[in-house]
């Protein structure tokens, strides 16, 4: 009888010591069988929230990096407009025009670098073809053969696709987290890699590479009419970049809002889980003291009983 009582006290004391060491009152299913299902469900929900947060965090990093490239594009187009304004309004000689045209050529190279920007080894503006260089110079480009409805005649070729990456930020809500190169740099809403004649710059949209190429040519040939036209087109191209950059910024803001919401959900779920799992430190300490006292008392009784013999009753 005393041995059984001592074993029960030992088991309970070990259980309390485990609670005290871990800070958890639920360390195994047998501790509280009724709590197992809600605990497992809550843990699953926390895991889902963590997955959302990780995905959104990576996407937000990419969107912020993309915005840096778009800012560079905006600066390029703004500088091109300044050059063209100078060329139209200034009294320039051949050497002056050559200097300005050469700067436009360098700006076009900078634009190519921005269009082929990368993050974590992936091209930002290639759509799903993120391992493929999206833009290359067209070796067959001939300004006399240029056709706005045939992308094979354009100054630069696009090797990506039209597919923007969408992110599920809340159940059922998808947000596009990148821009495709054909949309941003060519002004095309669709892209057919198999048939160049299906690709054309949309009405009111601009091919940024073409605008810089034609601006350079107009300055080199001192074509005043072409320079006047180019001045307006460069502003339109810059506005196209600003508009898409603003759209991306709005999406990034929505992702940030969704992350804040999911962080709040995670805190609430952690509190729910804590109510099932976490032990009160003071209560656990007091219970251990009480159990140790009872255990010592049981040991004392057992010790005295073991010292008794039949002679004590004679």
Image: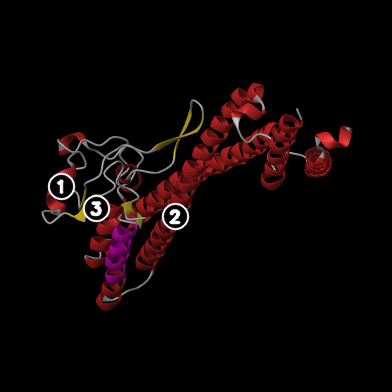
Say if the magenta span includes residue 156.
no
Instruction: Find numbered disc 3 in the image and state the secondary structure of the residue it sits on.
Output: loop
Query: Which residue does the numbered mark 2 point to in the structure image?
Result: 65
Is residue 259 among the parts visible in the rendering?
yes
- Which residues lie in the magenta part? 102-114
Point out residue 30 in the picture as x, y percentages from the top left corner: 62, 27
For marks 1 and 3, the one nearer the N-term is 3
Point out residue 1 in the picture as x, y percentages from the top left corner: 75, 27
Q: Label 1: few (<14), some or many (≥20) within 10 Å?
A: many
Q: Residue at x 21, y 42 (%)?
A: 148
Q: On the rendered structure, is 139 left or right of 176?
A: left
Query: In the rendered image of this protein, does residue 216 appear above or below residue 154?
Result: below
* Camera-nearest residue between 228 and 32: 32
Q: What's the image's color scheme?
A: secondary structure
Is residue 278 among the parts visible in the rendering?
no
Query: Which residue does the numbered mark 1 point to in the structure image?
Result: 153
Measure how far apart labels 2 and 1 are at the Cα level.
Answer: 31 Å
Query: Which residue does the numbered mark 3 point to in the structure image?
Result: 133
């Amino acid at each position: 009888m005393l041995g059984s009582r001592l074993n029960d006290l030992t088991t309970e004391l070990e259980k309390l010591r485990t609670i005290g060491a871990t800070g958890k009152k639920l360390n195994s299913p047998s501790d509280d069988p009724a709590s197992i299902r809600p605990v497992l469900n809550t843990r699953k929900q926390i895991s889902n929230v963590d997955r959302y947060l990780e995905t959104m965090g990576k996407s937000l990093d990419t969107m912020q990096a993309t915005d840096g490239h778009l800012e560079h594009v905006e600066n390029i187009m703004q500088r091109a407009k300044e050059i063209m304004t100078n060329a139209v309004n200034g009294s320039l000689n051949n050497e002056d025009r050559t200097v300005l045209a050469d700067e436009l050529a360098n700006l076009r190279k900078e634009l190519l670098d921005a269009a082929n920007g990368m993050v974590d080894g992936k091209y930002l503006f290639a759509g799903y073809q993120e391992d493929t260089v999206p833009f290359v110079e067209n070796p067959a480009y001939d300004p006399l053969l240029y056709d706005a409805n045939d992308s094979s005649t354009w100054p630069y070729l696009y090797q990506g696709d039209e597919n923007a990456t969408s992110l599920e930020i809340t159940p059922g809500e998808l947000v596009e987290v990148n821009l495709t190169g054909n949309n941003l740099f060519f002004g095309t809403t669709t892209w057919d890699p198999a048939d160049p004649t299906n690709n054309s710059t949309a009405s009111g949209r601009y091919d940024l590479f073409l605008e810089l190429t034609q601006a350079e040519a107009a300055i080199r040939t001192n074509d005043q009419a072409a320079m006047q036209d180019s001045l307006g087109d460069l502003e339109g191209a810059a506005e196209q970049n600003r508009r898409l950059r603003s759209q991306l910024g709005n999406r990034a803001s929505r992702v940030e809002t969704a992350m804040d919401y999911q962080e709040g959900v995670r805190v609430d779920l952690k509190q729910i889980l804590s109510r099932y799992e976490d032990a009160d430190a003071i209560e656990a300490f007091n219970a251990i003291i009480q159990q140790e006292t009872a255990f010592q008392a049981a040991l004392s009784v057992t010790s005295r009983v073991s010292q008794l013999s039949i002679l004590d009753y004679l």
